[in-house]
Amino acid sequence: MANTSLKLLGAWFSPIVWRVKIALNIKSLEYENIEETLNPKSQLLLQLNPVHQQIPVLLHGDKPICESRVIVEYIDEVWNSGPSILPADAYDRAMARFWAAYVDDKCTVAVRNVVREEDEEARKSYLEEVEDVLVTMEGELQKCCREEGKGFFGGEEIGLVDITLGSLLRCFSMIETMNGRKLMVEAKHPGLVKWAERFGSHPNVKGLIPETEKLVEYAKALQMKFKAAAPSAE
């Protein structure tokens, strides 16, 4: 039975919602999942997040918490029932936040733009941005594994950086399928390829994220909506 004091307002197709669900799983928390309509936005969303009017929103009792990384950190701070998502050391926490923000600023935005962009050259530049991020994160993962001897950015267990980058893995598969271009390859990203396998098979992740085919179908429908809404060239 879901914990009625915890409610998550989100959408099935959103990687930033998946990351909150992973954090909730790590802490073994039950919650009520509320699927947001978005088009139009529900009154509940407008009430809980009047500033950005975006998902996800975690409702803890009568307190709404917005923005996915903020929510993940909130979950980690409030509940100690399970592995810590952020490191105990202040410097290590700062570095985890730095890399999570880097992934969001550079990669999450580029992935979104790949789906929305109609111009082939512009789309190619966004794909290159994703590839650049993956090269950088490969180096960071190699450093973590070399210094700590662990399998994740967070050490022995999934941490903030793992959740932030890992929530995009299925999106990578989606845009690879749609663009005929492999983003993560063993020749360039040997560590990330193995890390992605560990992440995807982790008990707190496995079965949570929709299959690639379903996301491709949704993305194509979204592209059709964008095209229909675009102003005529006449």
Image: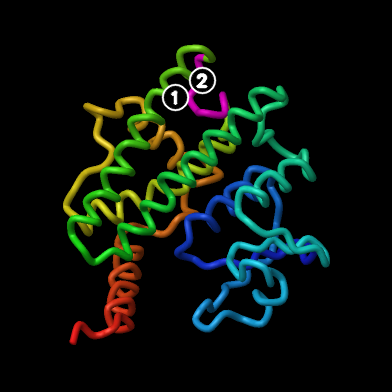
The residue pinned by badge 2 equals 150
Nearest to N terminus: mark 1 or mark 2: 1
Q: Is residue 84 above or below residue 63?
A: above
| Horizontal side, residue 172 vs residue 142: left or right | left
| Horizontal side, residue 105 vs residue 79: left or right | left
Q: Position of residue 124 (x, y in %)?
A: 21, 51
The residue pinned by badge 1 equals 140
Q: Secondary structure at mark 2?
A: loop
| Screen quadrant of the N terminus | bottom right
User: From this viewpoint, is residue 3 visible?
Assistant: no
207 within the magenta span:
no
In this orientation, which residue lies closer to the viewer: 62 or 157? 62
The residue most toward the top is: 147
Which three-letter amino acid code belongs to the residue tagged 1? Glu
| Horizontal side, residue 171 vs residue 151: left or right | left
Q: Is residue 75 above or below residue 87?
A: below
Which three-letter amino acid code belongs to the residue tagged 2? Lys
